[in-house]
Image (cartoon, rainbow, N blue to C red):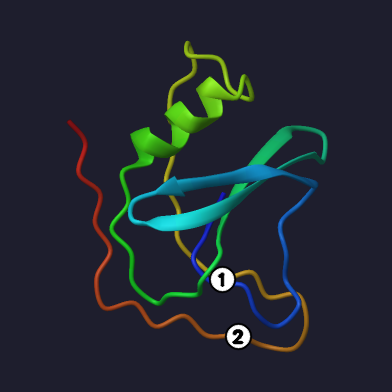
Amino acid sequence: MIRLDRQGGAGPLGTKYGSVGLDGAMRDSYQGDIGWHVCSFVRQANTTKASLNIDDLTQALVRRKLLSDDKCLSGIESGTEIFKGSGRLDTKAYSVDIG
């Protein structure tokens, strides 16, 4: 999970594992388990825009031995995590380049 914003009380699952500089921003990394292993990168400074190299994030997990290098990405989603009340997501652009 990659979080661009931390506000309103929502937070990552698990325990903070460390911090890493990726894509020009510092991110705290967390790991936890809810019946499957969950890794999260939470940007330390909120943003509403991002251009990310997912391979950099997965390689950071491999280096920390949180992900084996024989795994592959099977899906990409974007959205909000509403845990109280209602929410809204305004997206002007969403794209994924593979290759």
Q: Which residue is mark 1?
A: 80
- Identify the mark nearer the N-term, 2 or 1: 1
Whole-angstrom CA distance, mark 2 to mark 1, is 8 Å
Residue 11 in picture, x, y percent from top left: 73, 64
Q: Nearer the viewer, residue 95 or 17?
A: 17
**Residue type beneath disc 1:** Thr
Q: Tell me whether the residue at label 2 lies in contact with that at label 1, contact meaning CB atoms closer than 8 angstroms.
A: yes
Q: Position of residue 82 (x, y in %)?
A: 68, 75
Instruction: Identify which residue, 37 or 53, lies in the foreground.
Output: 53
Q: Nearer the viewer, residue 19 or 46?
A: 19
Query: Against 98, is 93 above or below?
Result: below
Residue located at (62% from left, 72% from top)? 6
Q: Which residue bears the numbered disc 2?
A: 87
Work out whether residue 74 can be spotted. Answer: no
Q: Secondary structure at mark 1?
A: loop
- Any part of residue 35 in sight: yes
> 3 and 27: which one is in front?
27
Q: Position of residue 60 (x, y in %)?
A: 49, 31
